[in-house]
Amino acid sequence: SLSKYVAHHGNSDNCVGCRMCVDACPSGALSSKFNGSILTIVLNGELCTGCGSCVDVCPFNVLELVPREKVEEFKIEIDVLRPERTEKRKYYMIARKVVDVSYCTGCGACTVCPPNGIIWKDGIVDFPDWVRLCRDCAICIKVCQRYHSIFKSGIGEVLEVKGAKSKRFKGQDGAMVSEFVACALEMGIIDTALMVSRDEKWKPMVVHVKHPDQLRSERIAGSKYSIAPVLPELNRIIKKAGKLAIVGTPCIVTGLRLLQKEIPLYNKVKLAISLFCMENFRYSSLMEFLRENNIDVTKVKKFDIKKGMFIVEMEDGVFECPIKDLDEHTSSGCSYCTDFTGVDSDVSIGSVGSPDGYSTVLIRSKIAKDIYDYMISKGYVEECEVNMKVVEKLSKFKVKKALKKEENA
């Protein structure tokens, strides 16, 4: 006899065409076929046993079990951008067009790969077993900003410009990132924020902040200047996540927006905070630089970049050098980046343009304005004037630097 339940697509908009459900179905109820780039997935309700294997394996909550009387079959059609192939059936994918030419931002959006075939390590992505694992869904290509030559620049759309510092938290400058996250939690806009913390050797790690008190940790506060796996962690948890915020560099936020465009499930991210960013470093390369200069990373209290100088504050002194001395340690993809302020974010935050101890805050969306208005009403922040000419100058300089790199490439 037929089971009481049958599989159904609860939200086919989230389907990327990976066909993992088809492979997992033990009864052969699910089948698929390509017609050019159009992939069709069909359920034969008479064969479905309601076992839920397809539901369990679906990475984006497309499928669900429903009472059999509601539906006996379904059909999903999705336009899949199938990657180019060579005669040996090896895919060009991102590897040849982005990673192999040091063009990759290291944002990690491509780790959305349904069978987890794409791995992220220290800002570098790899496809160690893609011949066997690739599902031909091309979601990695769809969310890769460099594959599509997406470059953002300038100040972007801004509702309000503020200069402020938190009265509750300590941070790199005005601790306004911590204040935004804390207020979003208090307001119930989010229940979790993905933020970058570190270990005793300053290796970045993503932590789940669920309460404002966590933001008092000195390991969460302050800049790490190393690429962090924010999007790989988001990809790992998105299926079961609640309302989220993420904090990251401009490329991470752009990667998020591409994920949201392709997979509505990622709209669980309600707040995206971007940090001003001129360049970033792979952790291993930054550590190599510190060793070359006889710096014990376990004694470092703070990293900073100001007025063209890289500054390392230690327990027993301060090390300074021109930031250009770290050019060979800069992540290769940063050399082509033109986005200083993070134009795709809800709010952008950095020290440039504000006095020492304060943050420049570029409010871009209504939700960010609501949060800022809330912190003002609570008396959580102290405001100051902002010199936007400095922000605009650095934004233009980053574009000029990237264009020069492109010309010399």
Image: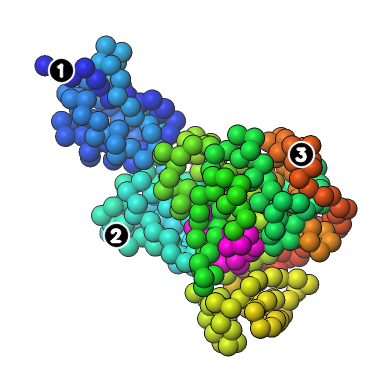
| Figure check: 371 above or below 140 | above
Magenta stretch?
A: 218-230
Disc 1 marks which residue?
2
| Figure check: 180 above or below 78 | below
- Seen at 44% across and 57% down, the residue is 94
Residue 280 locus on image (x, y percent):
60, 67
Q: Quadrant of the N terminus?
A: top left
Q: Earlier in the sequence, mark 1 or mark 2?
A: 1
Q: Give the CA distance from mark 1 to mark 2.
A: 39 Å
Between circles 3 and 1, the one closer to the viewer is: 3
Between circles 2 and 3, the one closer to the viewer is: 3
Q: Is residue 57 visible?
A: yes
Judge whether residue 226 is colored magenta. yes
Residue 40 locus on image (x, y percent):
32, 31
Q: Earlier in the sequence, mark 2 or mark 3?
A: 2
Image color mode: rainbow
* Tag 3: amino acid: Lys
Q: Earlier in the sequence, mark 3 or mark 1?
A: 1
Disc 2 marks which residue?
129
236 horizontally vs 228: left or right: left
- Seen at 71% across and 71% down, the residue is 305
Judge whether residue 64 is colored magenta. no
* Tag 1: amino acid: Leu
Disc 3 marks which residue?
378
Residue in front for this viewpoint, 263 or 377 = 377
Q: Give the CA distance from mark 2 to mark 3.
A: 53 Å
